[in-house]
C-alpha cells in the first residue's frame, strides 16, 4: 500500500523560498506522475503541478514563474520549491500520486506552511 | 482554464437521505472527472473516477454520473460517516488541473 509523507519548513518569511519534500513508500516513484496540491485555510484545493520520473514537469500557469519540482529516484522522493512567497501562499500542502485516467488516488497527510515575518 | 462549478455550496441532510451534488464544467471534459471526500484536518480521498467508476473499497451508496459538462455525485442513504466536504476535479486538461469549490454536506 502506497504511503506519502510531506516534510519541510512550516514557517517561511515573506519573499523567501518554500521547500517541501514528499517521501513515497510502497511504490516506485518511477511508475506514476506525482503532484503537489495546496489548500489555504478554510478554502478549496489548488493544483500546483506534477513531476514525472524523467524530470518532466507541468505547472499551474498561475504559479509557473515561481515553482520548481524535481524527483530523486534514488531516495524515492520528490520535491517542491516555491520562490518569493507571500501570505497568500499560506496553506496546507499535499503531495499526491496521480494515476493516469484515474485522478489522485493516494495523498500525504498534508503539511501546513505559514508565510509570516 | 476549465472552470468547475459545484452546487450547492452547502447541503443540509439527515441520515438516510439521498443527496445529489452537481458539478458543471465550463467546457466539455468528456468523462475525465473525479470526486473526492474530505473531512476536517484530513487529506481528500478519491471516491469516483472517470465520472462513474467507483474506487475499490468505496461503499456502493456512492455513485457518479454525467458526461460532457454536467456531472453528479449521489449518496443513496446518507451515513454519519458521510458528513464531509466533496470536491469534483477535471483531468481533461492539465493546463491546469482544476477542482470545484467544494460542497459541504452537513447534518440537518
Image (cartoon, coloured by chain):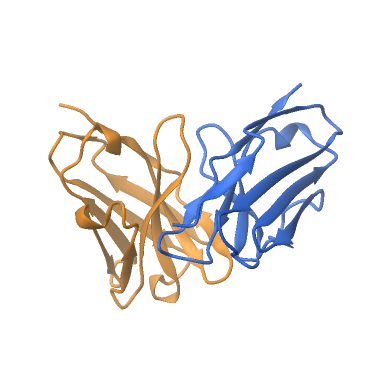
Chain colours: A orange, B blue
> In the shown orientation, is residue B25 left or right of residue B58?
left
On the image, the x and y values in percent for residue A59 come to: 32, 61
Q: Quadrant of the N terminus of chain B?
A: bottom left
Identify which residue is drawn at 55% across, 46% down. Answer: B100
On the image, the x and y values in percent for residue A80 come to: 27, 55
> In the shown orientation, is residue B72 left or right of residue B27?
right
> In the shown orientation, is residue A29 left or right of residue A64?
right
Q: Is residue A112 above or below residue A8?
A: above
- Residue at the limit of the structure toward the top, as seen here: B108
Q: Tag count in the figure?
A: 0
Could you say which is closer to the camera, residue A73 or residue B102? B102
Q: Residue B82 is drawn in which quadrant? A: top right
Q: Is residue A95 above or below residue B10?
A: below
Q: Quadrant of the C terminus of chain B?
A: top right
On the image, the x and y values in percent for residue B35 come to: 63, 52
Q: Is residue B105 above or below residue A20?
A: above
- Residue at the limit of the structure toward the front, as seen here: B27
Q: Residue A21 is drawn in which quadrant? A: bottom left
Q: Residue A40 is drawn in which quadrant? A: top left
Could you say which is closer to the camera, residue B53 or residue B29? B29
Identify which residue is drawn at 72% across, 49% down. Answer: B73
Identify which residue is drawn at 50% across, 33% down. Answer: B41
Identify which residue is drawn at 31% across, 57% down. Answer: A61
On the image, the x and y values in percent for residue B50 come to: 65, 65
Amino acid at each position: 500500500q502506497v504511503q506519502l509523507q510531506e516534510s519541510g519548513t512550516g514557517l517561511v518569511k515573506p519573499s523567501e523560498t518554500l521547500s517541501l519534500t514528499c517521501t513515497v513508500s510502497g511504490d516506485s516513484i518511477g511508475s506514476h506522475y506525482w503532484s503537489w496540491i495546496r489548500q489555504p485555510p478554510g478554502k478549496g484545493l489548488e493544483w500546483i503541478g506534477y513531476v514525472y520520473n524523467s524530470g518532466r514537469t507541468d505547472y499551474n500557469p498561475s504559479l509557473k514563474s515561481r515553482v520548481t519540482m524535481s524527483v530523486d529516484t534514488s531516495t524515492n522522493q520528490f520535491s517542491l520549491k516555491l520562490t518569493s512567497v507571500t501570505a497568500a501562499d499560506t496553506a496546507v500542502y499535499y503531495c499526491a500520486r496521480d494515476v493516469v485516467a484515474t485522478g489522485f488516488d493516494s495523498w500525504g497527510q498534508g503539511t501546513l506552511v505559514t508565510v509570516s515575518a | 482554464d476549465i472552470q468547475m462549478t459545484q452546487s450547492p455550496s452547502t447541503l443540509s441532510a439527515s441520515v438516510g437521505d439521498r443527496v445529489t451534488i452537481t458539478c458543471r464544467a465550463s467546457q466539455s471534459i468528456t468523462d475525465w472527472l473525479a470526486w473526492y471526500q474530505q473531512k476536517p484536518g484530513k487529506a481528500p480521498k478519491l471516491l469516483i473516477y472517470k465520472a462513474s467508476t467507483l474506487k475499490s473499497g468505496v461503499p456502493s451508496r456512492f455513485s457518479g454520473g454525467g458526461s460532457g459538462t454536467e456531472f453528479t455525485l449521489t449518496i443513496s442513504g446518507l451515513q454519519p460517516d458521510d458528513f464531509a466536504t466533496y470536491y469534483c476535479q477535471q483531468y481533461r486538461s492539465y493546463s491546469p488541473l482544476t477542482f470545484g469549490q467544494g460542497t459541504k454536506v452537513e447534518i440537518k
